[in-house]
Image (cartoon, grey):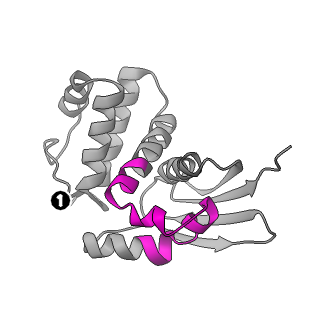
Amino acid sequence: MDGVRMKGMVFTSFLEMVENKFSLHIVDQIIENSDLPSGGSYTSVGTYGHHEMIQLVVQLSQRTNIPVADLVRTFGEYLFTQLIELHPQFIQENSSVFSFLQKVDSYIHVEVRKLYPGAELPAFEYETPVPGTLIMSYRSSRPFADLAEGLINGCIQYYGENINMVRENLDEGTAARFILTEAEVK
């Protein structure tokens, strides 16, 4: 077993993003130059070790000279658009960034588990210390706080709200706190 498992949908979306933003040739290169137990053959309903994703991102970074963290955040933004295309009801039921994000654990992850039984999802805790501020604490068994940040950025971009985000790392990529503050419109 290759550590913690991830749903194949994440892998297929990542490779699709690489093809769209770079090229099919780059996709082939990163797969060929990684030591992947799956051989780089992913299905959306399969599960694969998270180390395979790490290898693919590292290979992509080496070919593009873009830092790994930046690539993972960009993938998070891309993945948000994919999730919304696949599950538009998540957006239809929430009218703002804060409304949407506060339902990730209690609603969206529940729905994802229905679609993908056995999915190992990160956990979020929420605080709203003052109006216009949302604090999200992220914990995962995988080092993908950059992915969570990208997903949050994707959400902010989708809704088009003026929100500032500050990230505080709590652990080596497996835990972080995101402080989101509505910016005052001048």
- From the viewer's perspective, is residue 136 above or below residue 28? below
Specify whether residue 100 is painted magenta.
yes
Near-viewer residue (39 or 162)? 162
Residue at 35% of width from left, 44% of height from top?
54
Q: Is residue 92 left or right of residue 7?
A: right
Q: Which residues fall within the magenta stretch?
A: 81-108
Q: Position of residue 173 (x, y in %)?
A: 52, 53
| Residue 9 percent location from the top left of the image | 26, 54
> Which secondary structure is most common in the magenta stretch?
helix
Q: Measured from the top left, where is residue 73 in percent x and y?
A: 50, 42
Identify the residue position indicated by label 1 in the image.
46
Q: Name the kind of residue labelled 1 in the image.
A: Gly
Q: What residue appears at the point 82 percent right and 47 percent down from the top-left corner?
A: 185
Q: Residue at x 25, y 74 (%)?
A: 117
Image quadrant where residue 182 sits? bottom right
Dot 1: element? loop
Between 127 and 175, the one nearer to me in the picture: 127
